[in-house]
Image (tube, grey):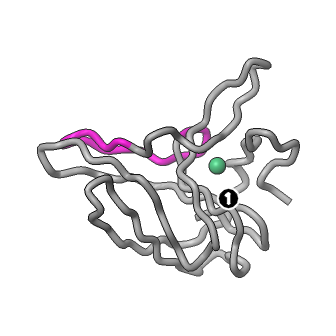
Amino acid sequence: MKAADEGMSAAFGELTNSSDQDVTVTSATSEASSMLELHETVENDAGEMIMRPIEGGFVIPAGGTLHLEPGGNHIMLMDLTAPLAAGDEATFTLTFSDDSTYEFTAPVKDYSGANETYEGDDQDTDE
Ligand SMILES: [Cu+2]
């Protein structure tokens, strides 16, 4: 997770699917944010890179890995419940299309990137 005092932040990492079937992440929850969204980053008509909720969720291919990274797919923390400082940790729960869940803990790190513009918003995620 990217360190932030308030407002929005994002979580990045790798999700590996060791099964022989595609799986789809349909939602995420965390104590770190009252609302989370699954975002993709796309180019809009004006040629700007914007992020927006991904339609249908994150698909992790059978035997494959989904990379969550700045400038790409990521888990968006829309409204932090408390400041995220480097060294903190937060637990996330992913829900899949078959209603199964997966829980993991992610560390907070200082990171200067990941300042994509949110669709319909003139502000970026940075201070
Ligand atoms: Cu986002």
| Left or right for 14, reference 3 | left
| Left or right for 33, reference 27 | right
Q: Residue at x 54, y 55 (%)?
A: 75
Name the residue that disc number 1 marks.
Answer: 111
Assign the C terminus to one quadrant of the image: bottom right
User: Residue 9: x percent and y percent?
Assistant: 68, 61
Q: Residue at x 41, y 53 (%)?
A: 26
Front residue of this view, candidates 86 and 1: 1
Assign the N terminus to one quadrant of the image: bottom right
Determine if the magenta segment contains residue 62.
Answer: yes
Extreme residue in the left direction? 20
Determine if the magenta segment contains residue 29.
Answer: no
Q: Residues within 10 Å of mark 1 (few under 14, many from 20)?
A: few
User: Residue 116: x percent and y percent?
Assistant: 72, 42
Q: Amino acid at mark 1?
A: Tyr
- Disc 1, ligand 1: is the CB inside 8 Å? no
Total count of labels? 1
Q: Residue at x 64, y 73 (%)?
A: 34
Q: Quadrant of residue 88?
A: bottom right
Q: Residue at x 53, y 41 (%)?
A: 54
Give the answer, above or below, for where 17 lies relative to 40: below
User: Residue 112: x percent and y percent?
Assistant: 73, 54
User: Residue 50: x percent and y percent?
Assistant: 70, 35
Q: Secondary structure at mark 1?
A: loop
Residue stretch in magenta: 59-72
Give the answer, above or below, for where 52 lies relative to 32: above
